[in-house]
Amino acid sequence: MRVRRRTLAALCTTIPLALAATACSDSSAGQVTGTRGLAFSQTISNPTQGQGTCHRFAPLGVDHVTNNTGVDIWLHKGLDCTDPVGRPSTYLATTLSAGVAETPGLWHSFSTVGWPPPVPPNVGPTLN
């Protein structure tokens, strides 16, 4: 009977740890897509993470953003991830979309939330 108790105890401690590790992903692998009307679309693949990392949309800005990455992002009205007075940034969680109907002005840049992953996404051996 002791073997079963140890096995059960081991499962009860390792399964929650494994679930917690998979739920907390720091990977920014994926795409952020910004559009302006029907005529313009810009996709930024695998945006880098880190303190002060800013990603820019086209100079004219975008009015709709879809976040298909593993991390949340902040959408900014300024080109350098800043926000003009009266135009606050917008928080956009992973796998969601946002439009500028709620906030005046277009988005010109975004920054990722969190720390960079220990290994860059999509890194593997080079095959020749």
Image: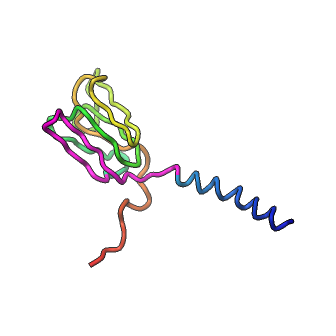
Q: Residue furthest bottom?
A: 128
In this rendering, the count of numbered labels is 0
Q: Residue at x 23, y 47 (%)?
A: 43
Quadrant of the rendering where the C terminus is positioned: bottom left
The coloring applied to the image is rainbow
Q: Is residue 95 left or right of residue 108?
A: right
Q: Residue at x 24, y 40 (%)?
A: 34
Q: Is residue 11 left or right of residue 2?
A: left
Quadrant of the rendering where the N terminus is positioned: bottom right
Q: Residue furthest right?
A: 1
Question: Residue 65: horizontal and vertical position, in percent?
Answer: 28, 37
Question: Residue 76: horizontal and vertical position, in percent?
Answer: 29, 34
Q: Residue furthest top?
A: 86
Q: Is residue 79 left or right of residue 20?
A: left
Q: Name above or below for residue 4 compared with residue 32.
A: below
Range of magenta residues? 23-46
Question: Residue 72: horizontal and vertical position, in percent?
Answer: 40, 42
Q: Residue at x 35, y 73 (%)?
A: 125
Magenta span has 41? yes
Magenta span has 95? no
Q: Residue at x 81, y 61 (%)?
A: 5
User: In which image quadrant can residue 106 be found?
Assistant: top left
Q: Name above or below for residue 120 compared with residue 95.
A: below
Question: Residue 13: horizontal and vertical position, in percent?
Answer: 70, 56
User: In which image quadrant can residue 82 be found?
Assistant: top left
